[in-house]
Image (cartoon, grey):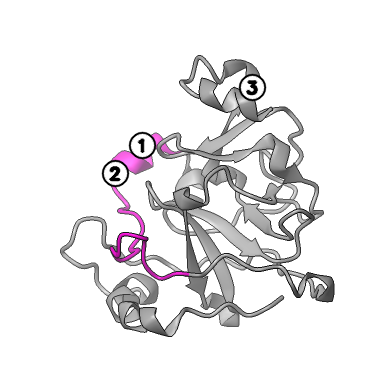
C-alpha cells in the first residue's frame, strides 16, 4: 500500500486540526470537538500491480477551506443512533469484521449516511473483499466524502468521513478491483441501506437510473 501524504500547501491547516486529532480540549467553534483515533481496521495488502492507480488526494480540510473537525457528540445524536452507531460514527471506532449488518448484503439498493441519509454508495459498486466489512470500489459522489490522513495506532491510513454530517465511515485502501483499484472499507454501523424498491418513496428516485 502506498503511503499517502498531505500536500505541503495544506501543512499549515494541520495546526488548526491539532485539537481535533490529538484529543485536546474542544474549540469554541461549533462542531469543533476532539476525535479519538480510529480503532485498527483491515490493513491493505501490498499490490504492485496497482502502481499506476491514482489514489484520491488526502486532505486535511474540506474543499471550502473549513477545518475538518468532524462531528459534535451531542445527546441528540446519542438518542438518534444505536450505541454501536454512535461509537463508530462519533467516536471513530471500528466494528467487528464478519459480525456487522451489511458485510454480506447482496441486495440492490443504496447505502446512505446513517446520520443524515446522504446517499454514499451504490450496491453496484460493492464487492467481496474478504475483509468482513462492506467494501466499495467507488462512491456515488466523491465530493460527499472527506479523506483525512490517519496516523493513529502507529499506521498511516486514509480515513473516510462523510463531508455533510462529519461522521466517521471507515478507511480507503488501494487494493480494490478494477476499474478504480480502490477499496472503500466502510463500517456497516455508519450506513443505512435503502432497497431499490424503496428509493422513490425515500426521495432517492433519481438514483434508479444507476441500476
Residue sitting nearer the eye, 100 or 181: 181
How far is the residue under mark 3 from the one under mark 2?
32 Å
Residue sitting nearer the eye, 7 or 157: 7
Can you give x and y, in whole percent of width and height, for residue 89 in the image?
Answer: 46, 51
In the picture of the structure, the residue carrying the numbered disc 2 is: 75
How far is the residue under mark 2 from the one under mark 1?
6 Å
Can you give x and y, in whole percent of width and height, for residue 29 in the image?
Answer: 18, 61
Quarter of the picture containing the N terminus is bottom right
* Residue furthest left in the image: 28
Q: Secondary structure at mark 3?
A: helix
Q: Vertical placement of 114 versus 194: above or below?
A: below
Q: Residue at x 82, y 54 (%)?
A: 130
* Circle 2/circle 1 CB separation < 8 Å: yes
Can you give x and y, in whole percent of width and height, for residue 6 in the image?
Answer: 47, 78
How packed is label 1: few (under 14 Cα within 10 Å), some, or many (20 or more)? few
Return the mark for residue 196: 3
Q: Residue at x 37, y 47 (%)?
A: 164
Return the mark for residue 79: 1
How packed is label 2: few (under 14 Cα within 10 Å), some, or many (20 or more)? few
Q: Secondary structure at mark 2?
A: helix
Q: Secondary structure at mark 1?
A: helix
Segment tinted magenta in the rendering? 59-81
Residue 71 falls inside the magenta stretch: yes
Can you give x and y, in whole percent of width and height, for residue 11 in the image?
Answer: 37, 83
Residue sitting nearer the eye, 106 or 88: 106
Q: Earlier in the sequence, mark 3 or mark 2?
A: 2
Q: Vertical placement of 5 versus 112: above or below?
A: below
Amino acid at each position: 500500500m502506498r503511503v499517502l501524504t498531505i500536500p505541503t500547501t495544506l501543512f499549515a491547516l494541520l495546526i488548526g486540526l491539532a485539537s481535533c486529532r490529538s484529543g485536546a480540549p474542544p474549540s469554541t467553534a461549533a462542531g469543533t470537538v476532539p476525535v479519538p483515533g480510529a480503532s485498527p481496521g483491515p490493513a491493505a495488502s501490498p499490490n504492485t500491480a496497482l502502481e499506476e492507480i491514482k489514489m484520491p488526494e488526502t486532505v486535511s480540510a474540506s474543499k471550502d477551506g473549513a477545518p475538518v473537525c468532524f462531528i459534535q457528540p451531542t445527546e441528540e445524536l446519542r438518542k438518534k443512533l444505536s450505541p454501536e452507531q454512535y461509537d463508530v460514527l462519533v467516536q471513530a471506532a471500528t466494528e467487528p469484521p464478519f459480525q456487522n449488518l451489511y458485510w454480506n448484503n447482496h441486495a440492490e439498493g443504496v447505502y446512505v449516511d446513517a446520520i443524515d441519509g446522504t446517499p454514499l454508495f451504490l450496491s453496484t459498486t460493492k464487492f467481496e473483499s474478504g475483509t468482513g466489512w462492506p467494501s466499495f470500489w467507488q462512491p456515488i459522489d466523491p465530493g460527499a466524502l472527506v479523506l483525512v490522513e490517519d496516523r493513529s495506532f502507529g499506521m498511516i491510513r486514509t480515513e473516510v468521513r462523510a463531508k455533510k454530517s462529519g461522521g466517521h465511515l471507515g478507511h480507503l485502501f488501494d487494493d480494490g478491483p478494477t476499474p478504480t483499484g480502490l477499496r472503500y472499507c466502510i463500517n456497516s454501523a455508519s450506513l443505512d441501506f435503502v432497497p431499490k424498491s424503496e428509493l422513490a418513496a425515500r426521495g432517492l428516485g433519481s438514483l434508479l437510473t444507476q441500476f
